[in-house]
Structures are given as structure tokens and as C-alpha cells.
Image (tube, rainbow, N blue to C red):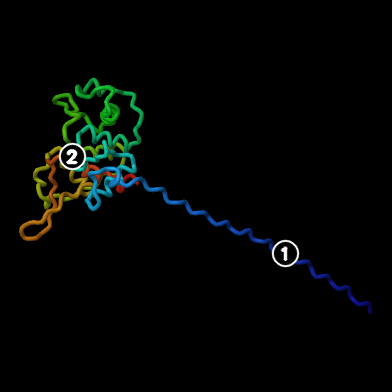
Amino acid sequence: TPTPEVTPTPEVTPTPEVTPTPEVTPTPDPTPGPSVTELFTDVAEGKWYVANVQYVYDNGLMSGNDGLFNPTGNVTRAQVVTTLYRLAGSPEVTDYSACEVLSDVKEGKYYTDPVCWAYNTGITTGNTSTMTFNVNTPVTRQQLASFFYRYAEYKGYDISESADISTMLNADKVSGYALTYVKWAVGAGIISGSETTGANGAVAYDLKPQATATRAQLAAILQRFCEQYVD
């Protein structure tokens, strides 16, 4: 009987080598900007607003002049809309009708484009009784709330927050027109009120709605707003 043929063992297909995944080079952290405590002689280490000033400076929202930031100085209405205009990306302005409607808004000023943009977008109407914008008038804290509310509305952000401010000091001093804006600003964490300690040692928060806002306070509100809605 002939020996049966041996069936050859099939060749084993070699397993292809796995190409190793290259390591991802981490993106370096952005180089921090210059310290505002070195840029501005009136912004001292340890002040409550240093981080806020650093934020608005790094993001091109606010700057200083002649080595000063003037943190305790008043903020004018023109300055507020200028910061909001920068926050919006400084959009091109082609409609300058606000210069005709509002008698104190002049062409060729630093605030011209910002005020016209704010007027065109409904962020401000100006003072309709005098037909002025009051460009150099200091802005109050409740007016700041109204500017930021209208800006948030213009951008389509959620403006449904509404806090109970009845326990805050001077809540009864909020003007009727600004009540919705202030409640939103407190509810959204944009405005917290000034912390005070009463005679009994209890901590309370003072809205100070009619007080003029400072540049440091605007810087703080800008940062809180950006962290809540933009960043």
C-alpha cells in the first residue's frame, strides 16, 4: 500500500507590525502678558481688583493712560459702551445716525463708533428727553447692570436669571426701570454688592445702585460677565 501524501502545513501569514502612535507634543501655555502691577503705578499688589485689571488688560477690554489705570476713578457712559464694543470684537460701523440724533455724540471721537454701534443695536437709546447720550456723565451701578443686560440680550445669551434682592442693603433704591436688570445681574453673579458688617457682626451686601461705578468695579464686572457668558 503506497504511503499517503503528506498535506503541507499552510504558511502562517505574519502579523503586520503596528505603527506606534506618535506622541502628541503638548501645546505650550500662552505667554502671560506683562503684569499690570508693573505697567500701572496705581495698581498695587494685594488690592482686590488686581486680577480683574489683569484680565481686562490681557483681553484688550480696558487699558490705562500715562502709566496709570485709575482704578478708583469714575467710569463714563462713553467708556462703558467702548468696553462693550471691544468685547463684541469692534464690529465695523456704517450707520452714524446716532451722531445726528444724539447732539453730544461727535464724529471722530474715540467713542464715536462704540456709541453708534450701541445705538444701532439697541443697547442704548440715549436720553430721549434731551436727545443726548451724556458721553462724559459717570455711570451708576444700576446703569452698568442695564448696559450689560442689553448687551447680553443683543448677543442672545440666557438672561432668565433673576435674584431676590430684597435682603440686600439699599435694594429699595433701585429705580423701577432698572429692577429687572439689577435682579438679573445679581442672579447671574455679575454684581454681588459691597460686603459690609453690621453692628451685630452680621455680614450684609450693599447694592449701592445709585453710586457711581469705578474703573476697578467695571473691570470686575467685565471679568465675571465674560466667565459666565463668553469664555
**Quadrant in the rendering for residue 9:** bottom right
Which residue shows up at 94% across the image and 79% down it?
A: 1
Residue ID for mark 1 = 14
Across and down, in percent, residue 125 comes to 21, 29
Across and down, in percent, residue 144 comes to 20, 39
Which residue shows up at 34% across the image and 42% down it?
A: 59
Circle on res. 93 = none
Across and down, in percent, residue 194 comes to 15, 50
Q: Along the horizontal axis of the image, is 29 left or right of 154? A: right
Real-space Cα distance between discs 2 and 1?
A: 77 Å
Which residue shows up at 32% across the image and 47% down it?
A: 35
**Number of other residues with Cα within 10 Å of mark 2, as a class: few under 14, some 14 to 19, many 20 or more:** some
Tag 2: amino acid: Gly
Across and down, in percent, residue 90 comes to 34, 33
Q: Which of marks 2 and 1 is nearer the N terminus?
A: 1
Residue ID for mark 2 = 73
Question: Who is closer to the viewer here, 70 or 112?
Answer: 70
Helix, strand or loop under label 2? loop
**Quadrant in the rendering for residue 8:** bottom right
